Image: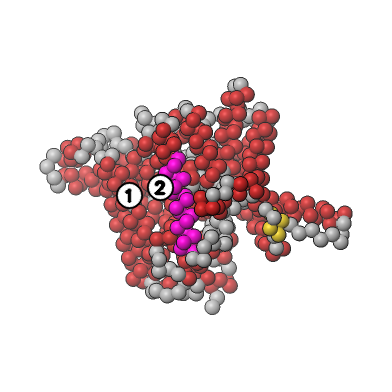
Amino acid sequence: MSTRIAIHTLGFLMIVLGALMLVPLVVSILYSEPSGAVAFVLSSLATLAAGWAMRRLGSGGEVGHRDAFLIVTFGWLLAAVFGALPFFLLGMGFIDSLFESMSGFTTTGATVLTEYDAEGYWIINSTAASGSFASGIFTALSHQLAGGPTANAALIGGDIADPTYYGLLFWRSFTQLLGGLGIILLFIAIFPHLGVAGRQLYYVDSARLKKETLTPRVKDTAKIFWGIYLLMVGLETFMLYLAGMPIYDSILTAFTTLSTAGYSPQASGIVAYSSLPIEAIVVFFMILGATSYNLHYILFYKGSISVYVRDSEFRFYLSIMALAIVMILLAGGGEGDLLHRLRIVGFQVVTTMTTTGFTNNFEYNTWPVASSMIIVALMLIGGCVGSTGGGIKVARILLILKYGRRELIELIHPRAVKPIKITGATVQEEVLRSILFFALLYLLVFFVASLAMALTEAENPVFDLISTVSAIATCMGAVGPGLGAVAYDFSGVTAAGKMIGVICMFVGRMEILPAMVLFMPDFWSK
């Protein structure tokens, strides 16, 4: 293992991230947001400078297997830290900024924002924003010019007295677009020289994607996945716009639907549009986002739609959602007539199991305890293997159930030899063992993190058991909204509790094992 090779490669990644920050800079300029433009200029320069420095400190060479663990783990951490800079420069506290950034890149969608403007768009607290570093820089620069800050803001159409945050909200959703398939996979797709290094990075980072590649070259596989991903984002944007959603909202909603992430520019989420066609479009693409991209590849490149019907995991995925809808309806979830309840409950089940986290109602937090338990279970299960969804994953749950059934059969027929299959393919015993180990480890981390959250929030009067459990489940599963005190945001959580959430989001996105490997002494031994 060579730390210098890892640092050198991470430098490349930081340069890519710094360049991507120029996109929300353009948005801030288009919407005449002087403080936003300053924040993104400074963030981009800081990230590019860090990338340049890491390139100078590191050295080139072939990336080994252990190097790949370092690059992927610290790549995600550095992206979250530097991605937090725009939030911090515009007035948010450091922990809140890190929480918002980590929630974006890990496609969790949990937020600490609480305020919104007259049009319903998220904003930063005016007192904090007016005293922000970016605002101070703009004011200082303006004093060097004739007219002062107010006049200079007016020259570009901005208003420092009543600022908007379209650039920041774009960045917020853009981080989720990048995090959906993964910034490492994007890195592999755009840099042709990685070669063997790209394959190593793919195998470590593709926790959400099936480990096998669709083509002999990992770079080509990465390009295929990103091509399908962006094509569906474009299609959803177009459909949402036709359904009556403003173009800005359509773009950002599409970013966060296919990434199964859930950030909305509107504080009230999908409720803001009060439109059944918009909800139907979002549901459709949420389901696609949490479906294996290997199936999408077969559809787009081989023209076979029947592949979805033949896939055991996809059928089980839809069955779980259908069963959850029926159970919540029977448990008394939702209010009004049956059709309205079906609309509300159906959306909530899909948005939870796909780990997207959009809301089309504000009543789910008042549903009976049985409904809440089902919601938490869906958070833990998550989407399909090979998708942008989080959680334990449907295929793993299916294989664990099949394994349990086989154990019961062998109690009756001790000499029976019954291989476990999924979609016609026999699953090897070592794969089954690794799945059982992962599920056990996931639940163990969930329990320990829940206990830690309960201890940090012991003095918090609004935090109860369902708040604690759902806060960890939603962060680990990359869902976003929880239940109880964290049903809508994490603003009421202590700083220590938010940091536990940040750790859970990161560990959940890494699917635990790559992050835990770094704590083993054997990893660092020569």
Query: Which one is in front, 424 or 35?
Result: 424
Q: Are marks 2 and 1 in contact (CB under 8 Å)?
A: yes
* Image quarter of the C terminus: bottom right
Query: Which one is in front, 196 or 27?
Result: 196
Q: Dot 1, crowdedness within 10 Å: few (<14), some or many (≥20)?
A: some
Identify which residue is drawn at 29% across, 36% down.
163
Main secondary structure of the magenta stretch: helix
Q: Position of residue 409 (x, y in %)?
A: 83, 53
Give the residue at mark 1.
23
Identify which residue is drawn at 46% across, 63% down.
219
Q: Quadrant of residue 242?
A: top left
N-term mark: 2 or 1: 1
User: Distance from label 2 to label 1 (Cα)?
Assistant: 9 Å
Q: Position of residue 25 (x, y in %)?
A: 30, 48
Q: Is residue 444 visible?
A: no
Q: Which label number is shown at residue 174? A: 2
Magenta segment range? 218-236
Q: Is residue 280 visible?
A: yes
Q: Position of residue 1 (x, y in %)?
A: 50, 74
